[in-house]
Image (cartoon, helix red, strand yellow):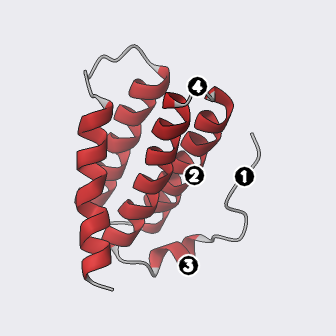
Amino acid sequence: MSIQHKGLTVERWRQMRLCEQMANIGSEVHRAFNWRNKGNECLSQNAFIRALELIDLSLAAHTEYPKLKEFARMRELLVDYFYGFHEYHTTEESWRKYFDQFNYMARKHL
């Protein structure tokens, strides 16, 4: 697996507000859904891998337990949704609603 966000460092990612980080992760997850719905599994998988890279950057950038817990749990649930057995029963709609809130907040505070 090749790294998609080569120019993005933990230090640069850490400078973004939490809502911006989540909105960027959500954009990649939305792309993964959109490509999957269009029948292009390869591009969907690439978008999901980019989302995982951003989540991993967030895990590396934060030291506060509540934030680490949120990112780790989100990662676990997303992997279950895309590659697992849907043990947590999440849906595309629930993921879109979850990330749309951060997108709204990030845009509101520009």
> Which element is circle 1 on?
loop
Looking at the image, is mark 1 or mark 4 earlier in the sequence? 1
**Residue highlighted by disc 2:** 53
Q: Are marks 1 and 2 in contact (CB under 8 Å)?
A: yes
Alpha-carbon span between mark 3 and mark 1 = 16 Å
* Residue beneath the point at 27% across and 36% down: 93
Looking at the image, is mark 1 or mark 2 earlier in the sequence? 1
Is 98 positioned to the left or the right of 1 in the image? left
Image quadrant where residue 66 sits: bottom left
Is 24 positioned to the left or the right of 44 in the image? left
**Foreground tag (1 vs 4):** 4
Where residue 96 appears, as percent x and y from the top left, is: 30, 45
Where residue 31 appears, as percent x and y from the top left, is: 51, 46
Q: Nearer the viewer, residue 38 or 77?
A: 38
Q: How many marks?
A: 4
* Residue beneath the point at 46% across and 67% down: 61
Residue 59 at least partly seen: yes
Q: Are marks 2 and 3 in contact (CB under 8 Å)?
A: no
**Residue highlighted by disc 1:** 3
